[in-house]
Image (cartoon, rainbow, N blue to C red):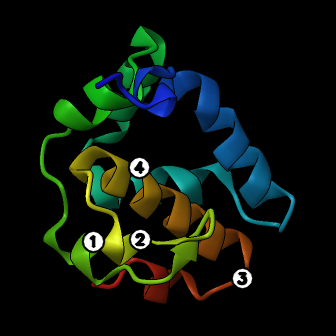
Amino acid sequence: MAKHRIFTMSFAKVYPNYVQKAEKKDKTKAQVDELIRWLTGYSQDGLEEQLEKENDFETFFAEAPHMNPARKSIKGVICGIRVEEIEDPLMQEIRYLDKLIDELARGKKFENIKRD
């Protein structure tokens, strides 16, 4: 079975869209980065290194230092699909990130987005 197209997309190519979506709602790149770091365990330097390498989503998540166990509490619909019901583990990780960015852009309190 062929890989889903998003798995082979460069994370660095999609990242500006995350930032742009947040900035349109008066949120910041720093907040986007903090959410990505919260989810994946990357340091800021590690995140920037991933962006420089232009790794695909599959590699980006495979190399993540420590996926936050609290991510399993992320619920809701993104792209018309409930994130908690996605069966493919990589697709679920990608959609967790999408959901975090979506919540940031929708004005949810930053402390509540991180689910700590």
Per the image, label 3 sits on a secondary structure element best described as loop
**Can residue 109 be seen at all in this image of the molecule?**
yes
Residue density around tag 1, few if under 14, some if 14–19, many if 20 or more, within 10 Å: some
Q: Earlier in the sequence, mark 2 or mark 1?
A: 1
**In front: label 2 or label 1:** 2
Q: Earlier in the sequence, mark 3 or mark 2?
A: 2
Per the image, label 2 sits on a secondary structure element best described as helix
Q: Is residue 58 left or right of residue 11?
A: left
Residue pointed to by mark 3: 107
Residue pointed to by mark 4: 94
Residue at the farthest top position: 53
Q: Is residue 60 above or below residue 84?
A: above
Residue 66's spot in the image, x, y percent? 12, 50
Q: Quadrant of the C terminus?
A: bottom left
**Can residue 37 be seen at all in this image of the molecule?**
no
Residue pointed to by mark 2: 83
**Looking at numbered disc 2 in the image, what kind of residue is underneath it?**
Val
Q: Quadrant of the N terminus?
A: top left
Q: Is residue 106 left or right of residue 91?
A: right
Between the C-alphas of marks 2 and 1, the distance is 11 Å
Identify the residue at image location x=73%, y=65%. 27
* Total marks in image: 4
**Looking at numbered disc 1 in the image, what kind of residue is underneath it?**
Arg
Per the image, label 1 sits on a secondary structure element best described as helix
Q: Earlier in the sequence, mark 2 or mark 4?
A: 2
**In front: label 1 or label 4:** 4
